[in-house]
Image: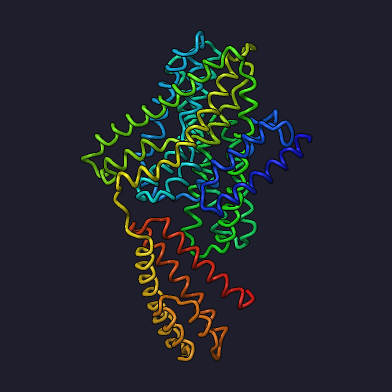
Amino acid sequence: MDITEGLLAGTVLAVAMAAFARHRGWGIALPVLAVGIVVGFLPFGPQAPVNAGEIFLIILAPLVFGEALSSSYLDLRRVGRLVLALAVGLVVIVALAVGAVATWLVPGIPWAVALALGAILAPTDAVAVAAVAKRAGLPRRVVTVLEGESLVNDGSGLTLLRVALVSAAAGSVSIPEAAGVLALSVLGGVGLGAIIGIVLVLVIRRTHDALVANALVLLAPFPTYFVAEAIEGSGILAVVVAALIAAHAMSADSGFRGRPQSLAAWAQITFLLQAFAFFLIGIELPESLSRVRSEQWPMLVGLVFAVLATLIITRFAFAGLMWLITMRQENRAIGGRGWIIIGWSGARGPVSGLAAFSLPVLLESGSALPDRNLLLATSLCVIVLTLLLSPTIGPLARLLKLPVDEDKQTQRHRLQQAMAKAALERIDTLSDDAEADDAPIPDAVLAPLRANFERQLDRQNVKKAREVEDPQLFNRLLIELLHAQADELIRQRDLRAIPDSVIRSMQHDIDLQIQAVRTARGT
């Protein structure tokens, strides 16, 4: 089986396992990873590709873009300080701690190479953390912090890896030089991401062709990532910033027709890429272990568990420090039990795998990277172990009896009442305007519309109400009223009365209703 056939067969296996896991209500990471490991040990079937780093690089940008696109800029802004502390401060501390452990356990390993291992494993994984956190029923604020951290810390971790590799090639790098590389990476990535995000916003707002707008959004991750890397900025940060800006623009524009198609397309793309990324990590693990020299196996086992312990202890210590700092501040709503969950939520995933595979065989100086195979195998083993620990978040949350947020059903009910009120007010405005223009709207049209929204948009009533004398006028007014509800949703979001995740869910429902009415009208 050649490489292309192997990748196609592997993709089919990964998607099939991911689909089965979703059907069973499981997260996809562990089942797909397990299938990849089993396949990797088999003497037949798909084999680990020799260019895994390049493959990871191709899927990384759209994968991170899709995850960021489903996140909320407004929700992240509310916990921005906590996210930055975890995504930058904790990444640096974890990288230094893991580097110190590696230099202690691996004789003769250069400090810069040991730091590279720390930078690889410092970022948490957006896919695994978010999926487990949501299934565990954690408070929305805790979930938002974990999602924001896992999105942003990828950029800081990969930037630190770049600094470590530059230092390994040069022999040493001064603190000012390292700070310069870090600053250029962050500023370049954020700046370029903001520019591309604004361009996407202009396209979304000005184009009347939803197909073209969505096509540009689909292509955006690739130029964003590679241009950012070309100017020595952080490609990951650029992709995240561009996606957050584009997602906010699509959500804020109640008239954007392409939103349902874009969200559906990205949900499917993200699902496929997630499945393939975890499968690739699994299939690469046996191959990486086979490259470790026999005399290094005791060292590998000790290093894996020492690094895992370091990751857990360092994260818990940092979470405890953050709890002490925020006890008397506005962010105290997370509470001590919430910080325990944050401390335990440290799953690693595809981004760490990409970082590990990006380790060069040869440094720019021409010399071989010391202990590359050992570092690669250690990284993949730690990734697998952290993913195995991630399902324990749910039982821990139940044991801690975390306070729950207001039920989503209650939040939706509150929103539906506000939206129905906005629609009824728009009906009165439209009726008054029509009478002022000497073209009153017939009561046979207005009455069923009022009845619909007085019953909280009962779909069955809408279907019955369409059997009126003037269905075209009815449908035109219905679309106008649905837009009024969409505007009310945006107003409620701007008031910060309801989490953005609930707003987007209901916004999607309205989009589908508008789309159905337009289809019935033939527009």
Q: Residue at x 49, y 23 (%)?
A: 304
* Residue 364: image location, x then y, percent: 62, 16
Place of residue 393 in the rendered image (x, y in percent of width and height, measured from the top left): 40, 42
Is residue 183 in view?
A: yes
Relative to 490, residue 269 above or below: above
Q: Quadrant of the C terminus?
A: bottom right
Relative vertical location of residue 215 with respect to residue 426 in this rendering, above or below: above
User: Is residue 194 among what the camera can see?
Assistant: no
Residue 282, x across and y down, in percent: 60, 34
Place of residue 470 in the rendered image (x, y in percent of width and height, measured from the top left): 56, 88
394 w.r.t. 101: above or below: below
Residue at 57%, 72% (x, y): give it: 516
298 or 242, which is in the foreground? 298
Q: Is residue 485 left or right of residue 469?
A: left
Asked if residue 157 lies left or right of residue 56, the reply is left
Residue located 42% across and 16% down the image: 100
Q: Quadrant of residue 277?
A: top right
Looking at the rendering, in which quadrant would you find the N terminus?
A: top right
Left or right: residue 424 versus residue 199 is: left
- For image coordinates 34% across by 67% down, the residue present is 414
* Residue 211, picture quadrant: bottom right
Furthest residue in direction right, as rendered: 1
Where residue 392 sits, quadrant-wise, is top left
